[in-house]
């Protein structure tokens, strides 16, 4: 062991101990995902006819290819498992690789823990070596978990092992990518941004390549893994590409580490402004400044989702249009109604996601309070109501904008297909029907922050979690109607499939107003808490 | 002189913990008032009540002639606050924070801001994330000192500053006093309080145990002395103001009241001084010496009576 690696073993064992609960959760999720997909596909596609029908629909649907991967091996049940689950598994494994690597490199360095460790008998490269070793081994364990999940549910062993190995290989590449990015920027969140962006690029490149079939997928590590074609061709050689790329990336990270100071990144942070812009003169200006980056990221995500939803409407037309059973199930009499029913459901999903934004933005106020950043503002001539109201204004207006944006994106991509420009306005309006429901969720979070501050954040997220569960499971599992009726989104008319109903929207809007008022009033009456 | 801050019998509890237990405090207009006490004695809690962040459970609190809870916003326009643990927004630069806080208080004086940045040697372009503790404190200090306010409330404002910046800070406080501002300065550094404060209040366990001018309190200050001498020292025990004398192996150590230090050291010199270490007592030591009897007699809780 050379001098710069002294202590890597100790650090590795320490990192393993710190992650002894986190890593098993990731691995369990991977194994469980495969096992669930495998069992359900073996039930759904029992007959050759059902398999053939699936092959015809999914295998020729550009949207599902764009999300899942190359439509190969769809003549066996195992092949459908690989097709449907591999991109989700890749996502899971890459996230695990990224979070684990960052946690033990840049995050420790930013918090000053690395400096404390390096002041002892620990070599320069030891923290990076320990972190990457842990992440690499975690990817290996993920391969085992996935292989076990598939093989234990009755799929052929070689294909199971190949699916696991292929997925893990993308994880390995991203351990390298993360290790490099962690040298570039000195800010933990910046590393997440860089790696997330590269993952997005890898995903899009692969999607375009798979849809067009022009070989572009070979430019993406996700494409390499999916080129193994588990359970059909069972090819191992594409994994050689990842085995070559990973060490190259890790060596690059090591060389970059040698060229920077501890705590710094290679990219110099841009200096800030010496004086504040005019906009930063009020609590509202400050709230906007604090929220805008997150809102922008949400806006991009929601717009992208809207485009995809709008684009998929076309395949809903062709897929379900010929299927009378599905038409009866959706309660639609014509193809146009079917598309509207589908769009009504997608807007409800978008609204649920936007409610997540509303909760996180509202809870930001509480984080400002407990971190001690509310006090400087509250002791500078700003009233409690104005301060909390500023955060709520941004949260409510931001959520409403997101809904409009989702509807607009859906409308535009739908109008590109139908050629009917009226769809743009019609669908933007339809998405906005969910605004009062989202305000209720935000209002509830605000009321909790005012009246039950120490429980507010977990309680608000629990409510959001319950909404997710109710929306996802109430109908398929035939839960009693009153349970799903508790969700504000069940009270919202599913425009455009249903007609606009003003009364429930007024009720929801009023309820939201009352909740916000309760939150503001209670916040004025209590102590400001700092952690 | 009128009182800018007037607190009596202030009680604040957090669950079962009694953070303030009948605290009294009076700060007069135009004075620099030191608010001293060990960690956890209730200094920050008192200040947060004075700022209307916490609601008192009992007692009378008046600040600048108003009720800090009810009239918070109006009162805050007339004061500036520097918290002990300055947390800033990581992505906003120091200069932007200074401008924001000044504008919220009703306007900036560009010349004064520039002068303070220069004196505190602070780069306003850096994002708050990259500031050290001391630099974050400087941001809050510049924002407070640049404001045209009647009252400065400073909660351990110098705990992260280097000695040069400490001197700059002290100069700024002298200037603020000369301009007629009132300053409430919480600290647990006796030397800083001695250099700056006209009057002091010392609190312990949520109660005021001593209050008065520096001269009144200085009689409480004892210096610890440890010395090694060539010959045994004679007659130390009989000297006035010498306490807790211990001899071992040619070394003596004792505590001596400030006014009698000179005589005690002269006695040491006569015995041939080899080495001498002298240190003023920490605040905690002062408390333990002064109030130890009452503490043990009353189960560690209810020290002292009102202001001396």
Image (tube, rainbow, N blue to C red):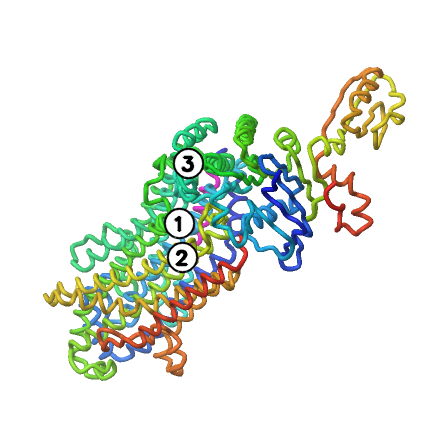
- Badge 1 density bin: few <14, some 14–19, many ≥20, Cα 10 Å: many
Residue on which disc 3 sits: A264
Letter of the chain that mark 3 sits on in the rendering: A
Q: Are marks 2 and 1 on the same chain?
A: yes
Please tell me whether residue A131 belongs to the stretch shown in magenta: yes
Residue A283 is marked as 1
Q: Is residue B276 above or below residue A415?
A: above
On the rendered structure, is A325 left or right of A94? left
Counting residues from the N terminus, which is met first, the one under dot 3 or under dot 2? 3
Specify which label sits upstream in the sequence, 2 or 1: 1
Q: Residue at x 56, y 53 (%)?
A: B54
Kindly identify which residue carries mark 2.
A389
For the residues carrying marks 3 and 2, which lies nearer the camera in this image?
Answer: 2
Whether residue B44 is visible to the viewer of this picture, yes or no, is yes
Disc tally is 3
Count neighbours of disc 3 (C-alpha within 10 A) and say few if under 14, some if 14 to 19, many if 20 or more: some
Q: Could you tell me if the residues under marks 2 and 1 are in contact, i.e. CB atoms within 8 Å?
A: yes
| Side of B124 where B52 appears, left or right | right
Q: Secondary structure at mark 3?
A: loop
Q: Nearer the viewer, residue B111 or A456?
A: B111
**Residue at 36%, 64% in the rendered image:** A355
Residue B11: image location, x then y, percent: 65, 54
Task: Confirm whether the magenta stretch covers residue A185.
Answer: no
Tell me which residue sits at (84%, 19%) in the image. Answer: B267
- Badge 1 marks a residue whose secondary structure is helix
Depicted A193 relative to depicted A159: above or below: above
Q: Position of residue A196 (x, y in %)?
A: 33, 51
Q: Which residues are magenta?
A: A124-142
Q: Are marks 1 and 3 on the same chain?
A: yes
Badge 2: chain ID? A
């Amino acid at each position: 062991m050379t001098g710069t690696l002294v202590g890597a073993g100790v650090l590795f064992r320490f990192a393993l101990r710190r992650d002894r609960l986190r890593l098993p959760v990731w691995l369990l999720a991977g194994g469980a995902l495969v096992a669930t997909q495998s069992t359900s596909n073996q039930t759904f596609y029992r007959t050759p006819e059902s398999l053939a029908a699936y092959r015809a629909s999914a295998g020729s649907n550009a949207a599902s290819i764009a999300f899942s991967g190359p439509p190969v091996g769809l003549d066996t049940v195992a092949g459908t498992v690989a097709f449907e689950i591999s991109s989700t598994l890749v996502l899971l494994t890459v996230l695990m690789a990224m979070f684990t690597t960052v946690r033990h490199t840049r995050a420790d360095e930013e918090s000053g823990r690395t400096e404390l460790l390096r002041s002892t008998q620990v070599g320069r490269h030891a923290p990076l070596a320990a972190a990457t070793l842990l992440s690499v081994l975690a990817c290996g364990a993920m391969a085992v978990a996935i292989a076990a999940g598939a093989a234990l549910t009755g799929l052929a062993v070689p294909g199971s092992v190949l699916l696991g190995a292929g997925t893990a290989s993308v994880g390995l590449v991203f351990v390298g990518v993360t290790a490099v990015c962690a040298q570039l920027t000195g800010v933990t969140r910046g590393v997440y941004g860089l790696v997330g962006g590269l993952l997005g690029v890898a995903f899009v490149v692969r999607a375009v390549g798979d849809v067009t079939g022009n070989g572009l997928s070979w430019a993406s590590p996700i494409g390499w893994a999916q080129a193994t074609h588990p359970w059909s061709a069972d090819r191992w050689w594409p994994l050689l590409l990842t085995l070559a790329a990973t060490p190259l990336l890790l060596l690059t990270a090591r060389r970059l580490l040698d060229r920077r100071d501890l705590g710094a990144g290679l990219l110099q942070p841009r200096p800030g402004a010496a004086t504040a812009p005019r906009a930063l003169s009020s609590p509202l200006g400050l709230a906007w400044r604090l929220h805008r980056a997150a809102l922008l990221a949400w806006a991009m995500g929601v717009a992208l989702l809207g485009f995809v939803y709008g684009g998929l409407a076309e395949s809903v037309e062709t897929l379900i249009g010929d299927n009378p059973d599905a038409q009866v199930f959706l309660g639609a009499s014509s193809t146009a109604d079917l598309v509207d029913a589908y769009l009504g459901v997608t807007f409800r999903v978008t609204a649920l996601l936007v409610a997540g934004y509303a909760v996180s933005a509202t809870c930001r106020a509480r984080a400002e309070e407990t971190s001690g950043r509310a006090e400087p503002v509250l002791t500078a001539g700003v009233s409690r109501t104005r301060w909390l109201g500023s955060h709520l204004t941004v949260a409510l207006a931001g959520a409403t904008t997101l809904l409009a944006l989702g509807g607009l994106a859906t409308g535009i991509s739908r109008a590109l297909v139908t050629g009917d420009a009226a769809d743009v306005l019609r669908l933007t309006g339809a998405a906005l029907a969910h605004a009062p429901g989202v305000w209720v969720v935000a209002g509830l979070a605000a009321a909790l922050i005012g009246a039950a501050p120490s429980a507010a954040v977990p309680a608000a997220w629990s409510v959001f979690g319950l909404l997710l569960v109710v929306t996802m499971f109430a109908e398929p599992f035939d839960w009693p109607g009153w349970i799903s009726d508790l969700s504000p989104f069940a009270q919202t008319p599913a425009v455009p499939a249903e007609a606009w109903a003003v009364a429930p929207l007024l009720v929801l809007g009023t309820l939201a107003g009352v909740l916000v008022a309760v939150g503001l009033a209670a916040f004025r009456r209590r102590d400001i808490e700092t952690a | 002189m009128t009182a800018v801050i007037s607190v009596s019998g202030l009680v604040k509890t957090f669950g079962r913990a009694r953070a303030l237990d009948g605290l009294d405090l009076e700060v007069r207009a135009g004075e620099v008032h030191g608010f001293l006490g060990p960690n956890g004695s209730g200094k920050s809690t008192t200040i947060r009540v004075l700022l209307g962040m916490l609601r008192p459970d009992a007692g009378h609190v008046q600040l600048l002639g108003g009720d800090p809870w009810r009239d918070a916003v109006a009162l805050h326009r007339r004061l500036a606050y520097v918290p002990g643990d300055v947390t800033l927004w990581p992505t906003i630069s120091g200069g932007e924070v200074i401008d924001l806080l000044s504008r919220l208080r009703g306007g900036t004086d560009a010349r004064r801001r520039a002068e303070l940045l220069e004196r505190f040697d602070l780069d306003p372009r850096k994002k708050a994330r990259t500031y050290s503790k001391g630099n974050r404190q400087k941001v809050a200090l510049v924002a407070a000192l640049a404001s045209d306010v009647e009252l400065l409330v400073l909660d351990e404002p110098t705990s992260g500053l280097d000695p040069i910046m400490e001197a700059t800070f002290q100069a700024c406080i002298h200037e603020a006093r000369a301009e007629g501002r009132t300053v409430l300065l919480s600290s647990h550094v006796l030397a800083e309080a001695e250099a700056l404060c006209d009057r002091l209040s010392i609190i312990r366990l949520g109660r005021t145990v001593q209050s008065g001018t520096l001269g009144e309190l200085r009689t409480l200050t004892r210096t610890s002395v440890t010395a090694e001498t060539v010959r045994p020292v004679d007659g130390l025990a009989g000297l006035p103001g010498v306490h807790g004398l211990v001899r071992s192996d040619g070394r003596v150590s004792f505590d001596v009241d400030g006014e009698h230090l000179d005589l005690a050291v002269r006695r040491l010199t006569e015995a041939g001084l080899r080495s001498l270490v002298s240190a003023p007592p920490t605040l905690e030591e002062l408390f333990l010496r002064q109030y130890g009897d009452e503490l043990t007699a009353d189960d560690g809780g209810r020290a002292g009576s009102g202001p001396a």
